[in-house]
Amino acid sequence: MNKAIFLDRDGVINSDIGLYYVYKPEDFKINEGIIESLKKFQSADYLLIIISNQGGIAKGEYSKAEVELVHNKMLSIFAENGISIKEIYFCPHHSSVEKCICRKPDSQMLEKAIARFGINTEVSFFIGDSERDIKAAKKVKLNALKIDSNQNISDICIQIISNLC
């Protein structure tokens, strides 16, 4: 079985300071410590998987194509730094428009990734910046780590790799 680091996108991987939604490539800025931390996780044989709510699609604020442009920019930055993201799962729904079972705090995106990649949840982690992230992680028995939005995760990375979490 594989071990994985699941990461929320906005507020964890990229800055969401001053933005309610990040859907334009020019607004996408990597948070401090992400590149170095993802390299360390990858070197420690963790699969890297992104799990993100993108409810602005359902609300008509932006399109799936715009989300994919942001993801392409993110993946390009990561590739330039030798980082490989195994998969990006995102929920295009919003509870004010339509009900679903993929939007965090529900866990369908996590369940799909765990099954698809044979993830051992006992040695895997979800790093998120909201209670929704933590609730979703706990539903599938992942180790859940809540950070402040836009926090540098370097210390958490060292703790995980050193088996301190």
Image (cartoon, helix red, strand yellow):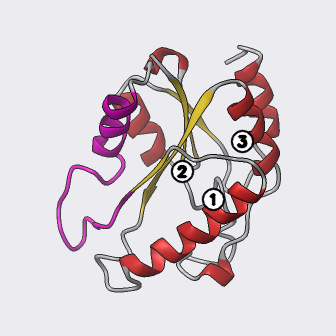
Above or below residue 67? Residue 152 is above
Between circles 3 and 1, the one closer to the viewer is 3
Residue 22, image x and y in percent? Answer: 56, 75
Residue 34 is a magenta residue? no
Residue 125, image x and y in percent? Answer: 55, 29
Q: CA distance from mark 3 to mark 2?
A: 13 Å
Residue 153, image x and y in percent? Answer: 75, 42
Which residue lies at the image location 40% right of the left edge and 22% below the top edge?
Answer: 141
Mark linked to residue 11? 1
Above or below residue 77? Residue 159 is above
**First in sequence: mark 3 or mark 2?**
2
Cβ atoms at labels 2 and 1 below 8 Å apart: yes
Q: How many marks?
A: 3
Q: Which residues are magenta?
A: 90-117
Which residue lies at the image location 68% right of the left edge and 49% below the top edge?
Answer: 148
Which residue lies at the image location 61% right of the left edge and 61% below the top edge?
Answer: 75
Q: Residues within 10 Å of mark 3 (few under 14, many from 20)?
A: many
Mark linked to residue 38? 3
- Specify whether 6 is left or right of 84: left
Q: CA distance from mark 2 to mark 1?
A: 7 Å
- Closer-to-camera residue (83/24): 83
Above or below residue 144? Residue 33 is below
Cβ atoms at labels 3 and 2 below 8 Å apart: no
Q: CA distance from mark 3 to mark 1?
A: 15 Å
Instruction: Identify residue for label 2.
Output: 8
What element does badge 2 sit on?
A: loop
